[in-house]
Structure formats: structure tokens, C-alpha cells
Image (cartoon, rainbow, N blue to C red):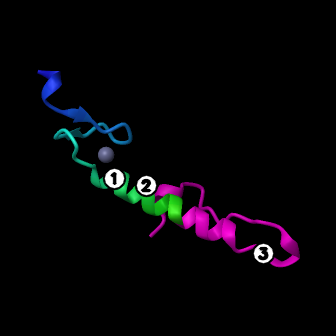
């Protein structure tokens, strides 16, 4: 029974084989956001992250 679907490693949702979970797409966007932040140094050349306490709650 468990062979008929994959489990999303991020949220545990059941996915069809080859299907990508929506939360994973959000995660990819989140990673791109991090890359953008890292790419642009703050003043003084230091890289600062503007995280909230919980990055998943970013609006
Ligand atoms: Zn998921």
C-alpha cells in the first residue's frame, strides 16, 4: 500500500510518483530568497540574514 505513493520529506503529504509537493515548491522559493539575500552584501561587506524567528512564516 505504501508503494503507491511517495511521502513528501518536508510535510509528510502523500504524493503521486513524480509529483512535487506544493510545500517543496515553497521551499525552493525560500531557498532562492536566501540566495538573493546572500548575493547582496550589506554595508561593510557583511552578510546579514533578515530572518524572522520562523522563516516559514514569511509573508
Ligand atoms: Zn510537502
Q: Find residue 22 and report its horizontal and vertical position in percent.
A: 28, 55
**Residue ID at (19%, 38%):** 17
* Mark linked to residue 23: 1
48 vs 23, left or right, is right
Q: Tell me if residue 19 comes above or below residue 29 in the rendering.
A: above
Q: Nearer the viewer, residue 56 or 37?
A: 37
42 vs 35, left or right, is right
Secondary structure at numbered mark 1: helix
Q: Find residue 8 and report its horizontal and vertical position in percent.
A: 31, 39
Alpha carbon distance from label 3 to label 2:
24 Å
In magenta segment, residue 10? no
> Which residue is tagged 3?
42
**Is label 2 in contact with label 1 (beta carbons under 8 Å)?**
yes
Question: Which quadrant does the N terminus fall into?
Answer: top left
Callout 1 environment at 10 Å: few (<14), some (14 to 19), or many (20+)? Answer: some
Q: Residue furthest top?
A: 1
Q: Is mark 1 within 8 Å of ligand 1?
A: yes
Residue 42, quarter of the rendered image:
bottom right
Alpha carbon distance from label 2 to label 1:
6 Å
Q: Find residue 48 and report its horizontal and vertical position in percent.
A: 74, 65
> Which residue is tagged 2?
27
Amino acid at each position: 500500500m505504501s508503494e503507491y505513493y511517495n511521502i513528501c520529506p518536508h510535510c509528510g503529504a502523500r504524493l503521486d510518483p513524480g509529483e512535487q509537493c506544493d510545500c517543496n515548491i515553497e521551499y525552493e522559493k525560500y531557498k532562492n530568497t536566501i540566495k538573493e539575500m546572500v548575493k547582496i552584501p550589506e554595508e561593510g561587506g557583511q552578510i546579514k540574514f533578515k530572518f524572522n524567528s520562523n522563516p516559514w512564516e514569511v509573508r
